[in-house]
Image (tube, coloured by chain):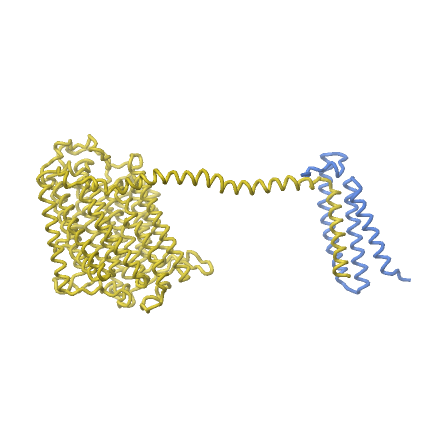
Amino acid sequence: MNAAYVILAMPLAGFVLLLWLGRRLGEPAAGWLATLMTTGSFIATAVTFSYLLGQDAGSRTVVKQIFTWIPVAGLHVNFALQIDPLSITMALFVTGVSALIHLYSIGYMHADERFPRFFVLLNLFVFSMLCLVLADNFLFSFLGWEGVGFCSYQLISFWFEREKPPPAGKKAFVTNRVGDFGFMIGLFLVFNHFGSFNYRDVFSGLMAGTPGALATVTATGIALMFFLGAAGKSAQIPLYIWLPDAMEGPTPVSALIHAATMVTAGVYLMARLVPILHYAPDALTVIAVVGVATALYAATIACGQDDIKKVLAYSTISQLGYMFLGIGAGAYTAGLFHMVTHAFFKALLFLGAGSVIHALHDQQDMKKMGALRRWMPITFVTFLIAWLAISGIFPLSGFWSKDDILAAAWASHGQLGKVLWAAGFVTAGLTAYYMSRQVALVFLGKARWREHGVDGVEPAGGVAPAEPQEPLHSPQAPHEAPPVMALPLVILGAGALAGGMIELPSTFPFGHAYALTRWLEPIFPVQIAPEPHVDSGLKVTLAVVTVALGLVGILLGLLPWLRSAEHPALEPGVLVHAWYFDDGVSAFVGGPGETAAGFVADDIDHGVVDGAVNGVAWLAKSTGSVLRRLQTGYVRNYALGLAGGAAALLLYVAIRVGG
Amino acid sequence: MTVPGAWYLGLSALLFGIGATGLLIRRNVLVMFMCVELMLNAVNLTFITLARMLDDIGGQSSVFFVLVVAAAEVVVGLGIIVAIYRRRVGATADDLHVLKG
């Protein structure tokens, strides 16, 4: 069970070693070291997982103390790991996907001048993410939460000498700070009410679900404040704006941090808070509505994007919305299930996109791709699997998880549930449409890259080259990814294909009768997390309808975009410009926002705040200049004062006491 | 024949007055220093007298503390005075008003 320490120690050791020796190791040794460390962490997680499997369901929570962090009276915070089904589920897929993407990066970051630095940050990210999910208290989790935010910022602006990445990194960091304020206020509320940051202390009285164990107002406040934090990290409306810009980072970073792992931290946080959410039904409604609104909104935008990574970025936002819909509908297991399957197929899509970008020498405009299936068979086949999985086609992983969430949404929140379901249903169709459009533009149709100079010398219409130039093996033909990049694609492809197996009904082959639900049962006991009840007949009907819509979406996506890459009618400007939300924010912040900030800076800060400070200083100074006259510097004056004072005191004592 | 306690108290009051007056009117630092010693010893005399009159050992033990402090003060004070005379020959207390506000 001490393997739990190794989970955290390996990436930390990798980070320290690479920081120290990275430059000397150089390429590719630094990358292999980082990959080795992450793989070791994954193996340690697997060992811990198998240990937990050997225990009774009731005793699957183990706390491993590392050291006492804050030993102040009334505030006792430990660096301690809480090993339980939820944290190990998270750690398993975080370390697993990380190891694959580390491996992929060795090929992708080839010939980058800051190759070792990339892996330093990647290992630090894995360490922070593991702190976040394995911590046994809110404060330690918050440390990891900020750590992943920092790594995200560093990695988005990894190519800091270029024009676009640094502002994108700043945007991500600042937007996340807004959410972090919510997280911090949540922390304060928790400490104020429970007097502890420890998960077990906070939740111990709530797990039984006794009515009235927690006031609704308190629970709603805590849940909504933490949801604000989650919305920042997991890119929900209105704090989603950083994620599309985060695509300026290297593609493996987009795959790992901005699709598979870090952005799911918000979902993890909500899953942790289930005992509190149970007492806050209104917060659940808010989460469900925000989630489904984000899902639908981002899916519409994804239909109008030309950049291969932007489509995937909006798709990620949309799928995260699904996860929050699952949480908000009370189907916590379904939300986490979708998080795991999404990690597989979305990481796969991003790595496939990276492979394409690599092959076309930094081309990211889908309108200048096409017909790549003949040049890149492995990438094509794995991309196809991910495409069908995200489109929710039976029996791939995405079908099972999306189906669970939609069915739960139907059954939750009364009449509102039907609306939630309808929005999620439309989103499923849009998802199938925009992903099919992408597949048609990138892998099928005509080889348009021939007309656009595939050697990548000419910059693609307004899209800054986001990948480093490298010497071309053969200047004309695109090439399949090297083995270190192809292997992760194949493994993730297997995951996207069969990931649904972890939550199959027992009637299906390989099914273990809802293995994930039973595994997570100690975390989501039925008293506080009742499964939304859906008739199996209704569930099948909903699934069939959704798959049918998905097929229609695929057809609608493939047919026009196979014929030609130009359909202005299908790409209204409002979608290309993402509903003008970013422009609106810029106009507001740049106009009235700047004026208000100027007023605060010039008038209030200069006049009132500085005035008060300077006034106090002036008062002290002028008082001093009066009082300094008393200081003559002659000893006798002081002695006289002393004697006079003593005489006065004696007189006082004589009159008051003696008399 | 015993001298009454009041005489001792009167003597110590006189000595204290002389010391205080000297401290206030003289400018020579060394003399002022001696005046301080005079005042201290006047107080000591009071302590002793009252200890005798009230038959209380506390007064006598206080004198020991005063003597120790006075000895320490002499060491530091004389050191400072010597240092001042080395730099400024014939300086009076009034010349040393660098602490003037």
Can residue A49 be seen in the rendering of this structure?
Answer: yes
Q: Position of residue B16 (x, y in %)?
A: 81, 51
* Front in this rendered view, residue A439 or A64: A439
- Image quadrant of residue B44? bottom right
Which residue is the extreme one toward the top?
A458
> Hue of chain B?
blue
How many numbered badges does the structure rendering display? Answer: 0
Q: Quadrant of the N terminus of chain A?
A: bottom left
> Hue of chain A?
yellow
* Front in this rendered view, residue B84 or A613: A613
A58 w.r.t. B17: above or below: below
Q: Position of residue A526 (x, y in %)?
A: 26, 67
* Front in this rendered view, residue A286 or A362: A286
Q: Position of residue A382 (x, y in %)?
A: 14, 47
- Image quadrant of residue A405? bottom left
Can residue A484 be seen in the rendering of this structure?
Answer: no
Which residue is the extreme one toward the right?
B1
Q: Position of residue A555 (x, y in %)?
A: 9, 47
- Residue at point 23%, 59% (across, down): A416
Q: Quadrant of the C terminus of chain A?
A: bottom right
Q: Image check: B23 left or right of A266? A: right
